[in-house]
Image (cartoon, rainbow, N blue to C red):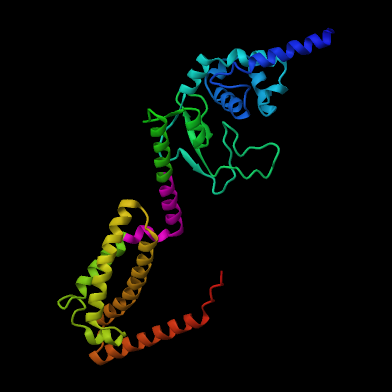
């Protein structure tokens, strides 16, 4: 046997032997995802900082080679597997924990992310990899090392800690519940950003409640039916409509103060109540004006009728000039 052949044979035996030595591995050979997950957890741990420069360089070269052990030199392999023992990796895994607090799941807005651990969505061969992640989960390093963002499947498959869970079923349930809570939070944030007037909801309810009292027969506007008719409404009609909107807004305001946002159905009702309140504010503004004025009864009605005609003309102009919505 030549020296070269003897060296190649020894090398193959060394590589073959080390393939069964990575912590937690079962079965023949080592898989890409298992190698990558093990290495990335170690690199994010506090133990990695204690390695020598040469040992860390071996792990860095493995990462640059896309976690392909066959591309590592024999010296690097010996350095790698000298560190990757069961006892150390158990300590490494114990450093990481998923906590279901808000902020520990990210939404990338589209399927563009990849799992730091197993590499899902991070194909080096296909730049159009469709198996990417939209959401990833933070594994907090409890010992002061680096936090790791990964897919939820990795947390289950590698039996990583989930706070409050003792079994994989409990861990999966906590991850799913946390996902639902984050989705609710993101919907709330999006709705609030799209509706900057949302903070006015309690004030709008209070205003409607006050106006429903003022529209009663003994209220501020209760005996102004003629003046209200000059503005195109009736006192009784306004009273009942205002009471209806007040009841509706009471429920909407309570829901908003409890949840911080509105469902699509409640949002639609809020828009209708808001439009009604604007119309009512216009009406009461002119009623308040004639109350304070020195005009005679006839002059008050003429003034209010003129304001009503102006408003009708303005609304008609809006309807004719409004740009039609494009068809989807």
- Magenta highlight on residue 222: no
The answer to whether 88 is drawn above or below residue 306 in the figure is above
Span shown in magenta: 182-201
Residue pictured at 28% horizontal, 66% vertical: 248
The answer to whether 214 is drawn above or below residue 37 in the figure is below
Q: To which quarter of the image does residue 11 belong?
A: top right
Q: Main secondary structure of the magenta part?
A: helix
The answer to whether 105 is drawn above or below residue 319 in the figure is above
The answer to whether 118 is drawn above or below residue 211 in the figure is above
Residue pictured at 53% horizontal, 34% vertical: 149
- Which residue is farthest left? 218
| Quarter of the image with the N terminus in it | top right
- Which residue is farthest bottom? 298
Residue pictured at 67% horizontal, 16% vertical: 16
Instruction: Please state the horizontal and vertical placement of residue 52, each as a whole percent of the image.
Output: 62, 13
Q: To which quarter of the image does residue 216 belong?
A: bottom left
Residue sitting nearer the eye, 242 or 126: 126
Instruction: Please state the horizontal and vertical placement of residue 170, each as a whole percent of the image.
Output: 38, 33
- Magenta highlight on residue 189: yes
Residue sitting nearer the eye, 186 or 86: 86
Instruction: Please state the horizontal and vertical placement of residue 94, each as a whole percent of the image.
Output: 46, 22
Residue sitting nearer the eye, 103 or 212: 103
Locate residue 193 relative to residue 278 in the image: left or right: right
| Quarter of the image with the C terminus in it | bottom right
Instruction: Please state the horizontal and vertical placement of residue 242, each as a whole percent of the image.
Output: 26, 73
Residue sitting nearer the eye, 320 or 159: 159
Locate residue 288 relative to residue 81 in the image: left or right: left
Locate residue 112 relative to residue 322 in the image: left or right: right
């Amino acid at each position: 046997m030549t020296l070269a052949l003897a060296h190649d044979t020894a090398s193959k035996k060394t590589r073959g032997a080390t393939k069964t030595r990575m912590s937690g591995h079962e079965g023949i050979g080592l898989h890409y995802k298992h190698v990558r997950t093990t290495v990335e957890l170690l690199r994010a741990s506090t133990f990695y900082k204690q390695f020598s420069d040469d040992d860390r360089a071996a792990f860095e070269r493995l990462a640059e080679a896309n976690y392909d052990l066959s591309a590592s030199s024999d010296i690097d392999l010996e350095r790698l597997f000298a560190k990757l023992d069961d006892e150390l990796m158990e300590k490494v895994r114990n450093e990481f924990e998923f906590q279901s607090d808000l902020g520990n799941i990210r939404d990338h807005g589209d399927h563009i992310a990849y799992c730091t651990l197993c590499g899902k969505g991070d194909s080096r061969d296909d730049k159009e990899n469709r198996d990417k992640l939209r959401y990833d989960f933070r594994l907090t390093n409890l010992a002061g090392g680096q936090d790791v963002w990964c897919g939820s499947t990795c947390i289950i498959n590698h039996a990583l800690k989930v706070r409050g869970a003792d079994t994989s079923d409990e861990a999966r349930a906590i991850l799913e519940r946390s996902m639902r809570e984050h989705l609710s939070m993101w919907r709330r944030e999006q709705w609030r950003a799209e509706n900057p007037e949302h903070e006015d909801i309690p004030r709008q309810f209070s205003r409607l409640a006050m106006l429903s009292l003022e529209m009663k027969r003994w209220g501020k506007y209760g005996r102004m039916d003629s003046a209200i008719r000059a503005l195109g409404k009736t006192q009784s009609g306004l009273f009942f409509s205002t009471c209806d909107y007040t009841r509706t807004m009471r429920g909407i305001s309570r829901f908003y103060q409890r949840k911080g946002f509105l469902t699509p159905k409640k949002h639609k009702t809020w828009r209708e109540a808001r439009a009604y309140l604007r119309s009512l504010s216009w009406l009461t503004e002119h009623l308040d004006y004639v109350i304070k004025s020195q005009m005679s009864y006839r002059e008050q009605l003429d003034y209010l009728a003129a304001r009503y005609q102006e408003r009708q003309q303005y609304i008609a102009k809006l309807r004719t000039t409004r740009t039609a919505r494009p068809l989807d």
